Amino acid sequence: MLGVVDGCLPKDAAGEFVAGGERSDVVHDLLAHLAEEMIRMNREKQEEIRGFLLWLSDYTGARIDDLSNKTKVSAYYEIELSELLGVLKKNRGKLACDPSRRAFGEDLRREYSASMEKLAPLIARIGEVDRLIDAIVFRLYGLTEAEIAIVEGSLS
């Protein structure tokens, strides 16, 4: 993909873009497509997260916003199941069910696993497309490896 971008943005021996040979319209269209894809994937990710949290709220009888450590619960896809279960156990008094019960753990495991099956590849793909967009933009600006390292260092 980046080879196509490089072909659309030819440079002379001094590393300057060759104005007559550039096809930035192709690069623009590619970036527009990738941006649309990012929007679609992020929307899909948010829908899955919202669905899991709605299930969890209905199942436990508690609003997520009323739980202590609600940030971890809301970002359940960034933590292990055991950590999520631990947070829910600490909120036992706010729940309509007992998170220490075996059935609770099994139901949570099933729903968490199903959600993560959908989210894991989606999150990975979002990361890949994000890195591709960055690489294209770096080429558009003609950044050197050293400049790219500075930009990437400031983003992390």
Image (cartoon, rainbow, N blue to C red):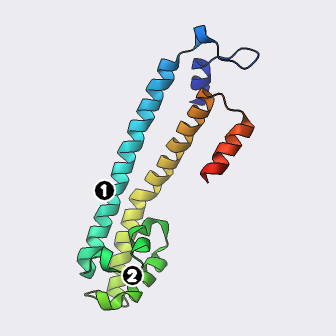
Task: Give the numbered dot on residue 68.
Answer: 2
> Which residue shows up at 70% across the image and 44% down it?
149
Q: Quadrant of the N terminus?
A: top right
Estimate the spatial distance between the alpha carbons at disc 1 and disc 2, rounded to whole Å.
23 Å
Task: Give the numbered dot on residue 98.
Answer: none
Q: Which callout, 1 or 2, points to the residue nearer the camera?
A: 2
Q: Quadrant of the C terminus?
A: bottom right
Q: Which residue carries the number 1 mark? A: 47
Residue 19 relative to residue 103: left or right: right
Residue 150 relative to residue 127: left or right: right
Q: Dot 2: few (<14), some (14–19), or many (≥20) neighbours within 10 Å?
A: some
Q: Is residue 50 above or below residue 104?
A: above
Q: Is residue 156 above or below residue 19?
A: below
Query: Which secondary structure, mark 2?
Result: loop
> Which residue shows up at 70% across the image and 38% down it?
147
Q: Position of residue 113 (x, y in %)?
A: 40, 68
Q: Position of residue 22 (x, y in %)?
A: 57, 14
Q: Position of residue 135 (x, y in %)?
A: 60, 36
Q: Considering depth in this image, is 112 or 153 the residue closer to the camera?
A: 153
Query: Which secondary structure, mark 1?
Result: helix
> Which residue shows up at 67% across the image and 50% down it?
153
> Which residue shows up at 56% across the image and 43% down it?
131
Mark before the other along the chain sequence, 1 or 2: 1
Q: How many marks?
A: 2
Q: Amino acid at mark 1?
A: Glu
Residue at the farthest top position: 20
